[in-house]
Amino acid sequence: SSETYMSELGALPGVAEATSTTEEPKPMYHRDPSDWDRPAVPVTKAYKNEAFLSSSHARHLRILCEYEETMQRLRANGIRATIMFFGSARSKDRAQYDDALAKSRKAVAEAPDGSSEQALARGTLERLQKSEWMCEYMEKIRQLAQRVTEWSIKTKYSLANQVSGVSRATTARLIEEGRKSPAGGRKSAYLPHSTDDAYPRPADAPGIYVCTGGGPGFMEAANR
């Protein structure tokens, strides 16, 4: 009967206290019958459970957060599209290379003949000399990043002509094609992200930004 059920339920740990009328109500917890003889454990929402979010089981969620949170920060700064520059972090421009070469040769000359220090210095010098071919690309990358930025500002890819890095003309065409599709529209229509217009941005801002890994070498050249 319901009376018997409520009597048995009231005898469970954590429930009698929660149903008592003489004390402050306490939360009731979902519990498996096999755990009835154990102390009650509060139920925590998964998105508030730091132990779970920091565990290996939630690694994919943390990765997804890195993408989404980064995108929101970019959008808050008016950045809708990027061109990524990645490359060797060991590359040097001509001035950096000549300076490093002089220091390496000096280290070899000052090390005792036949010593391990000299062998190490020679190895460093050899590796440096093998990277000389990258010097000319440092300047080429700098020029390319500059040309991309200027092109983005001066052409139809400027921010005033874009929705999420896609030209407004292309967007309009895709939406019109979507309306005419047998499926009744939207299948092939480009839909802007919900935050496209959430932040104010200057109309003359570039639509495409140079983005790098932030390290030295080729990435430093693009940042220049």
Image (spheres, rainbow, N blue to C red):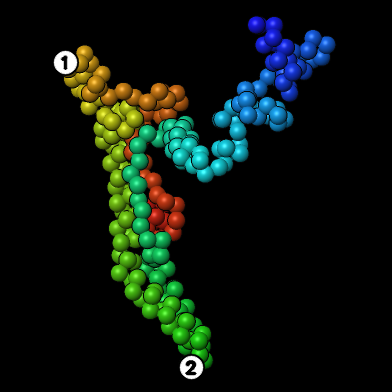
In the shown orientation, is residue 124 left or right of residue 208? right
Q: Is residue 171 above or below residue 107?
A: above
In the shown orientation, is residue 102 left or right of residue 190? right
Disc 2 residue type (three-letter): Asp
**How many numbered tags mark residues here?**
2
Q: Residue furthest bottom?
A: 113
Q: 68 or 111, which lies in front? A: 68
Q: Position of residue 185 (x, y in %)?
A: 23, 16
Disc 1 residue type (three-letter): Pro
**Residue 46 falls in which quadrant of the image?**
top right
Residue to which mark 1 is pinned: 182
Specify which label sits upstream in the sequence, 1 or 2: 2
Residue 113: numbered disc: 2
Q: Position of residue 112 (x, y in %)?
A: 52, 91
Q: Position of residue 127 (x, y in %)?
A: 38, 75
Q: Residue visible at 47% across and 82% down?
A: 120
